[in-house]
Amino acid sequence: MTGFNHAASGGLIGALLPLPLAIPVALASHFVLDALPHYGIPHHQRDKSLFWRVFGVIDILAAFGLGVLAISWHRYAMFSCGFIACSPDLVWVTRILRSRSFNLSDNKHWFTKWHVKIQRYERPWGLWVELPVAVVLFGFVWHYGH
């Protein structure tokens, strides 16, 4: 799932649930979303795809923008839970930056093996799942956060 959708779902959880309950729920939301059909292409195509790179940059900026909104609204639980919901993917970001490749298949740790395994519905057509989810989540974040 995109970082934006993870951040938005975590932010929404932070807006609706009391702390500290919201924190583990936001973390769990990451894995629930990753188990749903979502956008993805094989790593050998990711390494060469300009669309994938542009999409990734836009996604990161949009997720960051949600964090800025939450802070500007003084909704620190939204910010924290949005960050926590995104945090499992930070492992991938550091790995991609180090290897300069989107090949995430060489996983030695049990957690990363499991994290990859639950994303079995990552498909190019998943973009058509992610976009409406992003719009709906943003609407709820705007409504409950603002």
Image (cartoon, rainbow, N blue to C red):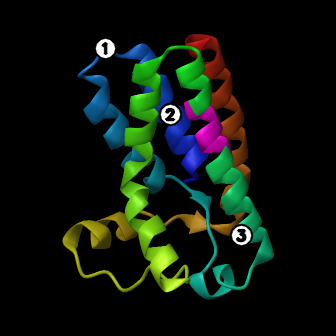
Precedes in sequence: disc 3 or disc 1: 1
Structural crowding at the residue carrying mark 3, measured as other residues with C-alpha within 10 Å and reported as few (<14), some (14–19) or many (≥20): some
Structural crowding at the residue carrying mark 2, measured as other residues with C-alpha within 10 Å and reported as few (<14), some (14–19) or many (≥20): many
> For this rendering, which residue is in front, 12 or 36?
12
Q: Secondary structure at mark 3?
A: helix
Q: Which residues are magenta?
A: 62-67
Precedes in sequence: disc 2 or disc 3: 2
In the image, is residue 64 part of the stretch drawn in magenta? Answer: yes
Measure how far apart labels 2 and 3 are at the Cα level. 22 Å
Q: Amino acid at mark 1?
A: Pro
Q: Residue at x 42, y 15 (%)?
A: 16
Q: Which residue is mark 3?
A: 52
Residue 86 located left or right of residue 127: left
Q: Amino acid at mark 2?
A: Ser
Q: Residue at x 56, y 56 (%)?
A: 37
Relative image position of residue 49 (x, y in whole percent): 75, 79
Q: Amino acid at mark 3?
A: Trp
11 w.r.t. 27: above or below: above
Q: Quadrant of the N terminus?
A: bottom right
- Quarter-of-image position of residue 48: bottom right
Q: Which mark is residue 18?
A: 1
Relative image position of residue 100 (x, y in whole percent): 55, 83
- Quarter-of-image position of residue 41: bottom right
Q: Secondary structure at mark 2?
A: helix
Measure how far apart labels 2 and 1 are at the Cα level. 15 Å
- Identify the main secondary structure in magenta: helix
13 w.r.t. 87: above or below: above
Q: Which mark is residue 9?
A: 2
19 w.r.t. 120: above or below: above
Residue 1 located left or right of residue 20: right
Q: Residue at x 46, y 24 (%)?
A: 78
